[in-house]
């Protein structure tokens, strides 16, 4: 079996990223970048061992990040040098005594590396290639020194770059005084053929803070309950829909428990209190108020803070009416107010099998949850 080692240079302090923490130790897509990269390589069966090269002073942080990893393929990290090339050479030196056949050198900042890209590099090495790099073609027009250049002749280089270990180790030692940012560049100097395999457009290098701009996801939950009115002429509204032939619910407004629960869910997700705080039931200007106006207020609030609804789900608990008969109409009403597609809304009815407040047909309850998002930079 060929020994495929992975060296992950992660010693840079990321001057262009402009953060007090190296970007490789920050979160991206819910995972710390360096840990995400290591996990991907661990999932490749041909990988024999992985070594990270980290900045001086970050050993404790590194050990904390990987505290729950029991995989012996993760070797103790080494400290990097002044440049990326120095750090790579430190990593190669550390694994040289372990008799590697091949080495994959992968920038920690490429957090979206995938198994297919890794395997394509390994397979090319196994077929006899001395140097292999993944690459993609640019989709933009290309100009060099101000003049148009055929983009079909251009390859955007990615990592991991794979090498016969003895070859790349010798080149790093031979050209130790030469600062290159691309390991395959040493092969070009020496006249060694570099094989290009198919890369992945998602395998981008995180360089600036804007590169890890992600949607901020928030969730909100709302609940409301109202008793049926003793006023037999009071009308029933649920999720904005008029329910003909049913006695309405008691309340200052139209007592639409469905919309009230959804309003509370949206306010909760935004961190803006509750419907009772914004529209107090003691204020008589809300007497017989159309609850759809509460939801319109929330819709404006979402726009103000630049949030959009991912989806919302409402459960109306009652013995009567049959919610399924009105759910499509309710979805259309809510969708129009929130200015979203009705496929993002779910409304359903449940009973309590004759138990409790709703089971005794004394009133109706409603529960709502909502997921919203807003893109923000992660520091």
Image (cartoon, rainbow, N blue to C red):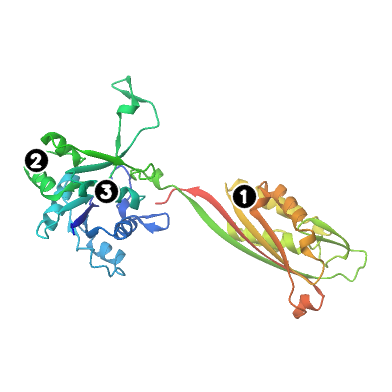
Give above or below for 318 relative to 54. Answer: below
Q: Quadrant of residue 41?
A: bottom left
Q: Earlier in the sequence, mark 1 or mark 2?
A: 2
Query: Foreground residue, 221 or 346?
Result: 346
On the question of residue 55 being in view, the answer is: no
Q: Secondary structure at mark 1?
A: helix
Query: Foreground residue, 39 or 192?
Result: 192
Q: Residue at x 31, y 20 (%)?
A: 146
- Cβ–Cβ under 8 Å for marks 1 and 2: no
Q: Earlier in the sequence, mark 3 or mark 2?
A: 3
Q: Answer with left or right where residue 95 lies relative to residue 121.
A: left
Q: Residue furthest front?
A: 127
Q: Residue furthest right?
A: 233
Looking at the image, how many numbered discs can be counted on the residues? 3
Residue 369 position, x and y percent, is: 63, 62
Cα distance, mark 3 to mark 1? Answer: 39 Å
Q: Secondary structure at mark 3?
A: loop
State the mark number for residue 107. Answer: 3
1 vs 2, front mark: 2
Residue 292 position, x and y percent, is: 76, 53
Q: Earlier in the sequence, mark 3 or mark 1?
A: 3
Q: Which residue is mark 2?
A: 175
Q: Which residue is mark 1?
A: 302
3 vs 1, front mark: 3
Q: Residue at x 10, y 49 (%)?
A: 166
């Amino acid at each position: 079996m060929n020994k495929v080692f992975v060296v992950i240079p992660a010693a840079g302090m990321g001057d262009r990223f402009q953060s007090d923490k190296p970007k490789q130790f920050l979160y991206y897509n819910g995972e710390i970048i360096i840990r995400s990269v290591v996990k991907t390589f661990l999932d490749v069966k041909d990988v024999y061992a992985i070594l990270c090269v980290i900045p001086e002073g970050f050993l404790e942080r590194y050990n904390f990040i990987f505290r729950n990893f029991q995989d012996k393929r993760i070797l103790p990290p080494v400290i990097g040098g002044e440049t990326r090339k120095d750090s790579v050479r430190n990593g190669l030196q550390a694994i040289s005594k372990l008799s590697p056949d091949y080495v994959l050198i992968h920038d920690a900042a490429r957090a979206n590396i995938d198994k297919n890209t890794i395997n394509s590099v390994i397979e090319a090495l196994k077929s006899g290639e001395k140097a292999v790099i993944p690459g993609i073609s640019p989709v933009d027009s290309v100009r060099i020194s101000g003049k148009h250049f055929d983009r079909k002749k251009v390859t955007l280089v990615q990592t991991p770059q794979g090498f016969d270990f003895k070859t790349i180790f010798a080149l790093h030692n031979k050209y130790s005084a030469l600062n290159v940012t691309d390991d395959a560049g040493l092969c070009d100097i020496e006249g060694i053929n570099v094989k290009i395999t198919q890369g992945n457009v998602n395998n981008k290098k995180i360089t600036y803070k804007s590169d890890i701009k992600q949607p901020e996801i928030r969730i909100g939950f709302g609940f409301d309950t109202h008793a049926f009115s003793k006023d037999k002429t009071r009308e029933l509204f649920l999720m904005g829909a008029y329910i003909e032939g049913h006695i309405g619910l008691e309340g200052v407004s139209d007592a639409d428990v469905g919309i009230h629960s959804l309003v509370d869910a949206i306010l909760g997700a935004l961190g803006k209190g509750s419907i009772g705080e914004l529209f107090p039931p003691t204020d008589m200007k809300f007497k017989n108020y159309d609850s759809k106006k509460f939801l319109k207020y929330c819709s404006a609030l979402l726009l103000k803070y630049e949030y959009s609804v991912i989806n919302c789900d409402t459960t109306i608990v009652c013995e009567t009416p049959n919610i399924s008969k009105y759910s499509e109409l309710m979805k259309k009403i809510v969708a129009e107010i929130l200015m979203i597609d009705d496929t993002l809304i779910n409304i359903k009815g449940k009973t309590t099998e004759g138990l409790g407040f709703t089971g005794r047909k004394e009133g109706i309850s409603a529960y709502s949850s909502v997921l919203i998002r807003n893109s923000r930079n992660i520091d």
